[in-house]
Image (cartoon, coloured by chain):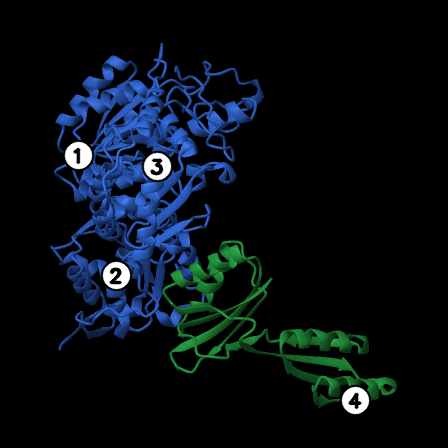
Chain colours: A blue, B green
Amino acid sequence: MSKISGSQIIIEALKCEGVDTVFGYPGGAVIPLFDALYSTPEINVVLTRHEQGAVHAADGYARSTGKVGAVIVTSGPGATNTVTGLATANFDSVPIVCITGQVPTSMIGIDAFQEADVTGITNAVTKHNYLVSRIEDLAETIKNSFHIAGTGRPGPVVIDIPKDVLLGSYKFNYDGKINIRGYKPHIEGHPNQLKKVVQMLANAKKPVVIVGGGAIISDSSPEINEFIKICDVPVTATLNGLGCIEYDNPYFLGMHGMHGTIAANSAIQECDLLIALGSRFDDRATGKLSTFAPNAEIVHIDIDSASISKNVNVDVPVVGDLKVVMKQILPMLSAVKRPEWMARIAELKKKSHQMTRGKDRITSIEVFDILNKTLEEDTIIATDVGQHQMWTALYYKFKKPRTLLTSGGLGTMGFGFPAAVGAQLANMDKQVVCISGDGSFQMNIQELATAVINELPIIILIMNNGYLGMVRQWQELFNDERYSSTCLMKCRKDPSKCRGVEEECFKFIPDFVKVAEAYGAVGIRVKKTEELESAIKKALELKDKPVLIDILTDRKENVWPMVPAGASLDDMMKGGMTL
Amino acid sequence: MRYILSLIVENKHGVLAKVSQVITGRGYNISTLTVGPSEKPDTSRMIITFDCDDKVISQIIKQMNKLIDVIKVFLIDEKEKVERELVLMRVHRKRENEDSLSRVIDIFKGRIVNVTPGNFVIELTGHSGKINAFIENIRPYGIQDLMRTGPLALPRYEIK
């Protein structure tokens, strides 16, 4: 077998893994690798404008398709800039393989130019990482990395490759069988545990199902929908579980947790059996643990045994791949009807949110009424983090899995737009919409260049209230309205003397419409509700460039309902909701 | 209570950092940690002891199992184990209490392994409780420096 360069080995390995798109940014240590990519037409190299954007884009690509996202960045700052992206993907179990350049092996440890201890830095934010110090190990390491990233509970894997390994030469062999002795994910659920679950379902009077991100990742939406129908059981989703159950499904209660619906939170508190499918009982989802689902026995089905009984004590744990476990359990079930419980659920669902409409400015519900009316059901929604994210979760009618891309665990502002870029590149047949805020969008605004250059017809909706709205909401409710560092329009003056927007305050900072135009995208400003629908329709017609719609929303609208941090799900603040 | 955790890990670069990262990153405290070669050249054995409750130790075990480079994790049963720790101490040598110091060392079956005009270096091997008791008995003689290995432990029977 003839020898090829380390860079060429990487290219061949990526091709064997079916990688069609790589998000990246070159630099000194990876020049040989980018040189090899230059003559690889099978792989589309997408140059983002920041390495964080590259990882989020690969994340959006992976979440929207289920495939492993691929990233290539340089050593030192290139690698350290990926940390937030990796942590975001790690928290939400997104498969990514991130190749980082490294200084030559002979220079590791001498504080060389653009040297960083990448495996040391990324230990805590990856599923696994490698430093490849011998070219003989390169192909096998890449193969193992894709396997580890994409199987079990998925996650990001970093491969740190010194420059001399890229420049070396060795034969390419990708036929070896994967055998990682410390990594054997549990796939099938234990039959005895499943028998217990079936028995508990038969005995339960008021069961509730929670679907989490694991339901989306494992593609088990069809099985779960069948399950809830057979068992006549209402279902609520975590933020990352949205899309598993269609919004209009009578069994669907909406999201639960801090900004959960009244129906979902009440049903959890009233239920006598709680079945969690691929969710990890995050504190934002459970509220105060000691009063969470106080009357319920808890079943937890998850591929990650470390997620079981970590926060909530579980009565019956089942470790396995959710889709496989669901397929195991479906034939064991007998159909039941629970008319009393479903009547109670219907009653709870009537108490749904009816928000007050805005007078001068646009409120959230009006934005989502229009979106629900105008967007196709396979539209992919990427969000940033904050109020707009929670409004999306509450009001947007998700109908399909993998249509919501959002940073649930880490809560990364700046995630949405680059994730939308990655998702659009992977789904050119679908519309991608990024719902963002004026704070979040500025955290990766530079990716407008990536979107324009790649002619991506992404619609960017900025819900612009001139505030870091979610923090402002907490300050209003819990910090005596002391709006410390949350107004984004404030001029330079003593915050204690601020009386709201005044003459000397900035009107637009920045002017997003002009920013969009400066990048060669289309910018539209919407000040009134009636302008929004036509703006979106116009944006939907443009097929070769991004459209940014700057929506001037009510400055002080809050997200309701809200369970204060650390409080019980029973203690929902309902604020401006009219019941 | 004390838990003794035994790990078989890949004998590779960076594995110790990964293990300790997960433990410290989640806010758990290591009491002792001992690493060395195992019976196979490509694996190492780690014995890590924790002072914690059962909920914490079960979470630690699960987190250790998640690490790709950790091949096997098990708790060592306090009743069915052989445990040894080594201590080295350098103590002041004073003529007036040399005899009584020697008697204490004999009682514990320790050894003086180095002698200079001003001090002794003493070694003792035993389970951690015995080492604790020995140190307390030597302390009055004036310990200059002390180093413990942390326990090594093996189950008495093969763990399948």
SS class, disc 1: loop
Give residue A447's mark: none
Task: Determine which residue is flagged by label 4.
Answer: B117
Q: Decide which of tag 2 and tag 3 comes sooner along the chain.
A: 2
Mark 2 → mark 3, Cα distance in angstroms: 34 Å
Q: Nearer the viewer, mark 3 or mark 4?
A: 3
Marks 1 and 4, how far apart in space?
A: 86 Å
Which residue has dot 1 on it?
Answer: A378
Q: Position of residue A89 (x, y in %)?
A: 33, 48
Q: In the rendered structure, the residue with mark 1 lies on which chain?
A: A
Three-letter amino acid code at the position of disc 3: Val
Return the chain for callout 4. B
Is the C-beta separation of discs 1 and 3 under 8 Å? no
Task: Report the residue marked by disc 2.
Answer: A147
Give x and y (percent) for residue B35: 50, 74
Q: Which residue is at a point 77% across and 75% down the rendered structure image?
A: B139
Q: Which residue is mark 3?
A: A208
Which of marks 3 and 1 precedes in the sequence? 3
Q: Nearer the viewer, residue A373 or A530?
A: A373
Mark 4 surroundings: few (<14), some (14-19) or many (≥20) residues within 10 A: few
Asked whether A271 or A238 is in front, the reply is A271
Left or right, A324 with respect to A412, comes to left
Q: Name the kind of residue labelled 1 in the image.
A: Asp
- Going by the numbered disc 2, the residue's amino acid type is His
- Nearer to us in this view, A97 or A91: A91
